[in-house]
Amino acid sequence: MTLDSQADLRESGSADALLRVEDARCAIPTGRGDVKALGGVDLELRAGEVLGVVGESGSGKSTLAGFIIGALAPGAQSTGSVILEGQDLRSLPSETARRVRGRRIGIVFQDPMMALNPVVPIGRQVTEAAMFNLGLSRAEAKAKAVGLLRQVGIPDPERRLRHYPHQFSGGMRQRITIAMALVCDPDILIADEPTTALDVTVQRQILDLLARLARERSLAMIMVSHDLSVIAGRTDTIAVMYGGYVVESGPTVEVFRNPRHPYTRALLRAIPRIDGSRHARLEAIPGSPPDLTLLGTGCPFAPRCPNALPLCADVMPAVSHPHGGRTLRCHNPVPEGA
């Protein structure tokens, strides 16, 4: 599908979303007050689409992933909907929702050692999800696990089923968690900062593996990252988050080419260029990310924004839809083509 046809479908609404997040809000109690982690996020993911969710630490990216899979911080207060093919998972009984998520949505976390049980062989960890969610026999689940481990690049998987997580390198452990995420043949894969704990060479290998698997399996994928270079070239669409809000979204190529939100433009200007522009000056974003326990009624980026107007500090901008499948939350956006 071409970029133009994707944009036309988004504008017309004729392409049904596989997953919709509607008005996601989340507050997490702390000793300093409630952290307003999500302020009202709307998101759509279509079958076969790779969506990048990007922003600084504390922007709400990982909380959004947790909202989708039903794994928020203890004590979190949340409202909103997670609609999977017309069914609101948050309105289902908890056990039913857990089974649907386990069958339809796979998750790859930042730190594989947090996802793996250190005292259980990896073969058992991969097979149990298939037995529970798909009703496979132990032999069927083992055969499936061996095939998946081979597919994600674990050598000699039949023998290594008996090994424990500590017997693998960090990159191999992350490959195992990817196999676990895929064992139930999900429709959606969420990769939440999947390379944070890995060295640079292994990071690229894991990112390329995820992209290949999504393509080969026709998976819809949400790739969460603080690094725009991870998102570039690996996603179809992008959602830029700041202070618990999606401030801009649209086709990745178009957002990179013509950023309309001042924060998106600032992020892009902070990326080193490799196109031969040796004298291009990197521009740091002034100020610090907002304290999410002290958010006011206005735009959270206003104190750092070069385009800020007087009303920005007091009035949160509504979402607008410029064109080409774009969304924008800004009172004074960057001019088209600037």
Image (spheres, rainbow, N blue to C red):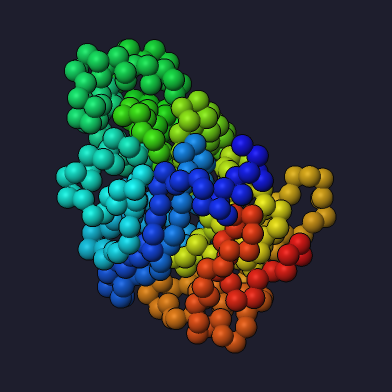
Q: Which residue corresponds to the image point at 41% horizontal and 71% vertical from the top-left?
A: 292
Closer-to-camera residue (32/177)? 177
Closer-to-camera residue (190/216)? 216
Q: Which residue corresponds to the image point at 38% horizontal and 64% vertical from the top-left?
A: 23
Q: Is residue 193 visible?
A: no
Q: Position of residue 36 (x, y in %)?
A: 37, 70
Assign the C terminus to one quadrant of the image: bottom right
Locate residue 280: give its quadrant: bottom right
Q: Is residue 298 above or below residue 54?
A: below
Assign the N terminus to one quadrant of the image: top right
Q: Is residue 32 left or right of residue 266?
A: left
Closer-to-camera residue (99/243)? 99
Q: Position of residue 254 (x, y in %)?
A: 67, 52
Q: Which residue corresponds to the image point at 53% horizontal and 33% vertical from the top-left?
A: 211
Q: Which residue corresponds to the image point at 22% horizontal and 39% vertical from the top-left?
A: 99
Q: Position of residue 281 (x, y in %)?
A: 77, 60
Q: Is residue 53 left or right of residue 77?
A: right
Q: Is residue 104 visible?
A: yes
Closer-to-camera residue (250/195)? 250
Q: Position of residue 137 (x, y in %)?
A: 19, 18
The total of numbered circles placed on residues is 0
